Image (tube, helix red, strand yellow):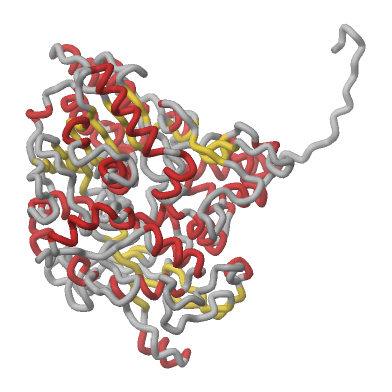
């Protein structure tokens, strides 16, 4: 510009907000610049290669909720500035939320009635292995596993990452994106080219997606996939498709029985959803609880993680799995509070008297499910009833019929495993993180005053006027002017059993999912012929949480819900199965899950 005597007058720009937010962001993720490399790169793969092991089975990786990057394909003038940019994942997300907040939230929300794109907005899952390798630069998710698989001769010819728009319900994933059709074709193509069945590794909610093709949160996606493929009305693969195409199914930190509930009521997403620190920072820093609740109630995919065996009508059964006011399967001896009370209020009797609301009480899973649903829009109630089911079915004839009902496919208690006697299932998860990684099993809640919330005024066509509607028909409050509730973060009591930290009753788990949800189906439920008629072998592997304090994200022996994807133990397990020596893997327990699971009222 100097050569051609061109001068530019640059306007004064106040960058103080950028600097302030940058500092806040770095403070929330103190190791952000050293997250990617810590000296462990490729080590597991090199050790397997030295044994003479090499790629044997094709591998498909299915990410969990919020792991897949989402990018805008809208050419509408309102959203044209976002075109082909990531709105979820990457530093661009932080930038858009900081400077274009209202447009970002409008683009990310789904239509409350259809559960699909709102007018003018079009967001799709990023594609390729990079879609979920890292959440943003230097914050890895699947990249450690991909690195180690590459050492033993995996590449894009025999390794496939199956990203998906985790906001959508399972039905809409196929309706809008053809997700299960494409995943079925990919697995069939791998069988034709490689001549071998596929190993599927699914993390968290990814397990739910595949059973819809196949089996489980990780269970949820995968379970839906399996059933979709087998169904004559959908994938048309027939009852033997899974047997002929799937060698092994690895559910990593799968949310088999529950994960998210409180977020639908009060928007405290970090406490109820697998959320890496970067994603949690963006949502909690820039959005109020109500705004997060609005977002969450429009993301139908997250409802697949609703607590199983909780009533949406008159059915009961939550107490069989999760306990009642006096007992829960995972209560410790001498507990002063039971996990069976999923939601509790401090001084509940005094609060009820003072407010004149005798209905306020501590709640079991059955009570809490209805209470939360009554405080969500009717559009959300309709969505959850038309897409999901959360009961428990013990009648084997009805279980067989459920194979034709897509609403049942994400619930392992209402669905039988595929007819695939030679397939192997590996349930893998962590246990024992002593502080924040011990799972938020149940909650202390606080009540506030009635507040008007414009975003929850019922939209057209959303109200439950038809008596055949699947909405809550008991008298329900006007949620546009309703009493606010939130996790009672002021309440901490380290002397009780279980301990209470910031309104959360701590229980065993991996920091995001409770131990009961992670392992009960694996060690007990799927041992019963009614849910596993083909007698599929299920191996459970628990990894103890043994982080190194000075290594980012815990190092090689972490068992945190997300960071386990980079652990040595999990990487070794995946590579053994993929290279054909999965028979070396045996059951490994470091928790009391067998004891807890035996206490569940399965029969």
Which residue reaches farthest right? Answer: 5
17 left or right, relative to 427: right
Q: In this view, does 295 lie above or below 176?
A: below
Which of 329/528 is in front?
528
* Residue found at the very far top of the displayed protein: 3
User: Residue at image x 17%, y 73%?
Assistant: 327
Camera sees residue 218 = no
Which percent across, then down, holds residue 340? 23, 71
Relative vertical location of residue 353 with respect to residue 384 in this rendering, above or below: below
Where residue 235 sits, quadrant-wise, is: top left
Confirm whether residue 23 shows in the render.
yes
* Front-lying residue, 576 or 386: 386
Given residues 212 and 602, the one toward you in this image is 212
Q: What residue is drawn where x is 35% and y is 26%?
A: 160
Q: In this view, does 319 lie to the left or right of 64?
A: left
Q: Residue at x 39, y 33 (%)?
A: 182
Picture mark count: 0
Check the picture and name the quadrant holding the N terminus: top right
**Which of the image's four quarters has the C terminus?**
bottom left
Picture residue at 22% right of the left edge, 35% below the top? 241
Residue 196, given in percent of the width and then of the height, sits at 20, 22
Residue 549 picture location, percent across and down: 31, 38
């Amino acid at each position: 510009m100097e050569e051609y005597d061109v001068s530019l007058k640059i306007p004064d720009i106040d960058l103080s907000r950028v600097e302030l937010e940058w500092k806040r962001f770095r403070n929330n993720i103190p190791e952000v610049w050293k997250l990617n490399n810590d000296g462990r790169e490729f080590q597991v793969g090199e050790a397997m290669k030295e044994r003479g092991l090499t790629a044997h089975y094709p591998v498909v990786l299915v990410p969990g909720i919020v792991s897949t990057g989402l990018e805008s394909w809208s050419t509408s003038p309102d959203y044209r500035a976002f075109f082909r940019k990531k709105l979820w994942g990457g530093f661009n997300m932080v930038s858009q939320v900081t400077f274009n907040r209202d447009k970002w939230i409008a683009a990310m929300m789904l239509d409350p009635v259809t559960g699909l794109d709102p007018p003018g907005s079009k967001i799709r899952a990023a594609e390729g292995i990079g879609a979920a390798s890292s959440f943003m630069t230097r914050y890895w998710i699947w990249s450690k596993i991909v690195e180690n698989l590459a050492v033993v001769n995996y590449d894009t010819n025999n390794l496939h990452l199956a990203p998906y728009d985790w906001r959508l319900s399972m039905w809409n994933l196929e309706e809008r994106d053809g997700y299960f059709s494409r995943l079925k074709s990919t697995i069939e193509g791998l069988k034709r080219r490689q001549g071998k069945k596929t190993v599927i590794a699914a993390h968290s909610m990814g397990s739910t997606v595949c059973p819809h093709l196949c089996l489980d949160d990780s269970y949820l996606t995968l379970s839906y996939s399996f059933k979709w493929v087998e169904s004559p009305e959908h994938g048309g693969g027939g009852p033997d498709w899974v047997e002929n195409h799937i060698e092994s199914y690895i559910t990593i930190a799968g949310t088999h029985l529950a994960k998210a509930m409180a977020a639908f009521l009060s928007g405290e997403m970090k406490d109820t959803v697998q959320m890496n620190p970067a994603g949690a920072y963006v949502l909690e820093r820039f959005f109020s609880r109500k705004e997060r609740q609005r977002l969450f109630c429009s993301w139908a995919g997250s409802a697949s993680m609703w607590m199983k065996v909780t009533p949406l009508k008159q059915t009961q059964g939550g107490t069989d799995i999760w306990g009642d006011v006096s007992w829960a399967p995972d209560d410790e001896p001498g507990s002063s509070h039971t996990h069976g009370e999923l939601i509790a209020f401090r001084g509940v009797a005094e609060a009820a008297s003072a407010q004149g609301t005798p209905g306020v009480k501590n709640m079991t899973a059955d009570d809490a499910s209805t209470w939360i649903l009554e405080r969500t829009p009717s559009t959300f109630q309709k969505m959850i009833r038309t897409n999901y089911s959360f009961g428990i079915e013990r009648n084997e004839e009805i279980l067989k019929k459920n194979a034709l009902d897509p609403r049942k496919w994400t619930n392992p208690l209402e669905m039988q495993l595929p007819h695939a006697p030679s397939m192997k299932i590996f349930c893998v998860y962590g246990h024992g993180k002593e502080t924040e990684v011990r799972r938020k099993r149940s909650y202390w809640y606080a009540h506030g005053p009635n507040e008007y919330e414009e975003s929850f005024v019922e939209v057209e066509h959303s109200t439950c006027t038809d008596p055949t509607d699947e909405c809550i028909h008991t008298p329900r409050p006007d949620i546009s002017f309703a009493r606010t509730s939130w996790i009672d973060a002021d309440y901490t009591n380290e002397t009780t059993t279980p301990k209470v930290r910031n309104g959360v009753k701590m229980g065993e788990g991996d920091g995001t999912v409770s131990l009961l949800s992670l392992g009960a189906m694996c060690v007990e439920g799927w041992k019963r012929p009614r849910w596993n008629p083909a007698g599929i072998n299920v191996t459970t592997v628990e990894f103890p949480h043994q982080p190194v304090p000075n290594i980012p994200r815990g190092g090689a022996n972490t068992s945190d819900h997300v960071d386990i994807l980079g652990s040595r133990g999990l990487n070794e397990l995946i590579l053994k199965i993929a290279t054909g020596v999965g028979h070396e893997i045996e059951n490994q327990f470091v928790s009391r899950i067998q004891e807890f699971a035996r206490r569940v009222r399965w029969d």
